Every structure is written in structure tokens, then in C-alpha cells.
Amino acid sequence: MSLPDLETAQGQRDRALMELLWSTGLRRAEVARLDLYSVDESRKTVTVRQGKGKKDRVIPIGERALRWVEHYKQQVRPALVVNPAITALFVALDGVEGLTVNGISYVVGRYIKTSGVARWGSCHLFRHAMSTQMLENGADLRWIQAMLGHASLESTQIYTQVSIKALSAVHASTHPAEQTQSEGPDGDDDEDTGLLADLMAEDETPMKGVDAKQNTKDTNR
């Protein structure tokens, strides 16, 4: 994100483009179809017209991305545009036409490869990162589905698999059962015996505040 040369119009355009991709998770074809009125500064939203499946949707855009897009739209884009008939939000450097799908891929891909984040560049990396990071930070899967424009929740569930590493770490640090395991020296033959004894002791310990009969009833449901 820090690679664009912000002393140039191209660098400021490219930074705004990548901030938008990361904040909204838009597909490159959806970005190519954005026009000057797609981003609503007052409502802090982006209107996506004719997304995948030819469906429209309105999604939020973050404060930082919004500031970059508005700066580009007001300070940079007017200096680039040669053809006043162009309504595309992001325009090519010649100012004659809007950035195409392939043009967006080329711009973004260069920065990704140069940064070393990945050996190949793809706009989908921003979409993937946004979804995974939101999920890891507690976002409900259905909200991510709405952001991405997935018709089915099954398409969104791929990100739960990506987040399993983070979920495992949270489980290990927060699940009460993980806090009761005994600690022993590495390679000690008595470690397995000690763990078994601890597990058996846990089974024999009555659940505090729970009626035994009620507990049996609940277990058999």
C-alpha cells in the first residue's frame, strides 16, 4: 500500500484504487464499472451496479479509503481527464478512457509483485484479505456475504477454512478445557499417565451449580 509515489498523479490514483479494493472487497470488473456517483461521501457507501449475477448492491466504505477516493476524485482525476464524456471513476493516465478490467489488474499486480506479498499479482488478493481479516476480527459470515455479493453463503464459507489457524489460537487461549491440562517435562514417561489422571479427575468432579438429574436429561437430548 505504501509503494505508490504520492508525488505523482498516478501514485495517488493507484493508492486510492487499492484502498478501495481492500476496504470494500470489490471485484475488478465491479471497480471498472464505478462512476463518479457510485461513491456517496455523505452516506459512506459504494453502489455497485450490475455486479456478478447482474445484481446491484450498496456496501459501506471505510473512512480511510473514502478519504483517498475523495482526494483522488476532487484533486487528481480532473487533471487527468481529457475526454469530458468519461464518467468512469478511475481513468487511464492518457485521460481518454476509464481503467479497464485488464488495466486494473496490471496496475494492482505490479504493486503486489514488487512488494513481495505474493509472487503473482491479483486484485482478488485484496478481496480475500478483507474477508479473512473481517472474519478473524469477529464479523458475522452473513455480513461478509453481503459485502462480497455472494448469492449463496456456501461461497463465503471458504474464508472460514482460511481462518482456522487463527481460530485454533483463540480456542487454545480461551477455552476453559485448555486451561486445565497439566504441564510436565518434555519426554517424561509419566506425562501421559498424569494427563490421564487429570482427565479422569475432571470426569469425577460434579458440575458446580448444575443439578445432576437435569444434567443427565440435557445430555440425553
Image (cartoon, rainbow, N blue to C red):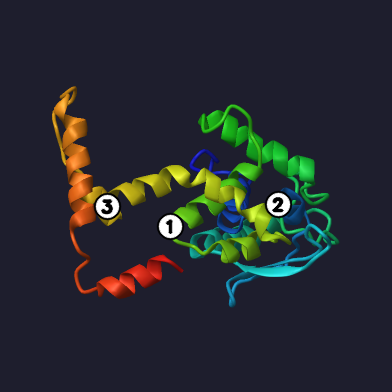
Residue 48 coordinates in the image, percent (x, y): 73, 65
Seen at 27% across and 52% down, the residue is: 177
Q: How many marks?
A: 3
Q: Residue at 77% of width from left, 68% of height from top?
A: 56
Amino acid at circle 1 = Asn
Is tag 3's residue or tag 2's residue first in the polypeptide sequence? 2
Q: Position of residue 42 (x, y in %)?
A: 58, 77
Mark earlier in primary sequence (1, 2):
2
Image position, residue 118 (x, y; %): 56, 31
Q: Which mark is residue 177?
A: 3
Provide the secondary structure element on which disc 1 rests: loop
- For disc 2, the marked residue is 27
First in sequence: mark 3 vs mark 1: 1
Identify whether 95 is placed above or below 210: above
**Number of the front mark, 3 or 2:** 3
Query: Which quarter of the figure has residue 8?
Result: top right
Q: Are marks 3 and 2 in contact (CB under 8 Å)?
A: no
Q: Residue at x 74, y 51 (%)?
A: 91
Query: The residue under label 3 is which amino acid type?
Result: Ala
Q: Return the mark for residue 137.
A: 1
Query: Which residue is pictured at 73% across the width and 62% down the height?
Result: 151
| Badge 2: residue crowd in 10 Å (few <14, some 14–19, many ≥20) | some
Marking on residue 161 = none
Pick the residue in front: 207 or 78.
207
